[in-house]
Image (cartoon, helix red, strand yellow):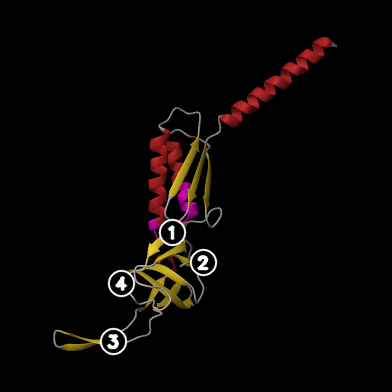
Amino acid sequence: MAKKFILALFILVLVIVLGLFMINNHNSVDVYIDGENISVETHSLNNIDLDKFNEDVCDLTMNVMNDTSSNASTLKNDISKLCDEYGLKDSSISIDSTLGSNQIPVMVHVDGTSMLPTLQDGQSVFINKTHNVHVGDIVVAESDEYGGIIKRVADIKGDSVYLVSDNKNISYEYINGKLYEIMGIKTWVNINDINGVVFDY
């Protein structure tokens, strides 16, 4: 009876020790984004340069924040590839933010007066990186004609989104002896050219 008890106790201790080892040997990467700042916390027993790895994850995250075609899934895939490069196999990757899990907030600055009176020149706004847009949303987009713009969604037809300025004022200006009408931008962009929807300003 005593031998069976000792054997059972030994097996229980062995299972607990192996379980703790497996839990502690698990690789995890936790990324937090507040729109401006990125923090990375990596847990691993592997012998790697964690500071360099975390710096590389921050760089990847910044690239995704600035790329209109990237999102939280893109970021997770990129981090997973980086984990493989560093030998961190089977890592769990968590993206968290002020908007919740698997959301990427980004702070951008308004340049110009075309969104008056809603947005002021130089004002900081926060966008959620998403292509889930609706008529009436204010979005940041990359236009082939105008470059980076912040406009309101006026219409959506399939993958095409019609963007307009809030500022409806029209002015006139002489340029090289010719009179030009100056008004806010109105343009169509592809849904994939939208970087995100403004959620705070």
Which mark lies nearer to you, 3 or 4? 3
* Gap between marks 3 and 2 measured at Cα: 34 Å
Q: Amino acid at mark 1?
A: Val
Q: Amino acid at mark 4?
A: Tyr
Q: Earlier along the polypeptide chain: callout 3 or callout 4?
A: 4
* Gap between marks 1 and 3 measured at Cα: 33 Å
Q: Earlier along the polypeptide chain: callout 1 or callout 4?
A: 1
Residue that mark 3 sits on: 171
* Gap between marks 2 and 1 measured at Cα: 16 Å
Q: Which mark is residue 106?
A: 1
Query: Crowding at label 4, few (<14), some or many (≥20) Cα neighbours within 10 Å?
Result: few
Q: Secondary structure at mark 1?
A: strand
Comparing 154 with 54, the one in front is 54
Position in image of residue 166 (x %, y %): 41, 80
Quadrant the C terminus occupies: bottom left
In the shown orientation, is residue 141 left or right of residue 23?
left
Q: Earlier along the polypeptide chain: callout 2 or callout 1?
A: 1
Q: Amino acid at mark 2?
A: Asn
Position in image of residue 105 (x %, y %): 47, 58
Residue 159 at least partly seen: no
Query: Crowding at label 3, few (<14), some or many (≥20) Cα neighbours within 10 Å?
Result: few
Q: Which mark is residue 146?
A: 4
Query: Crowding at label 1, few (<14), some or many (≥20) Cα neighbours within 10 Å?
Result: many
Residue that mark 2 sits on: 132
Magenta part of the protein: which range? 66-77
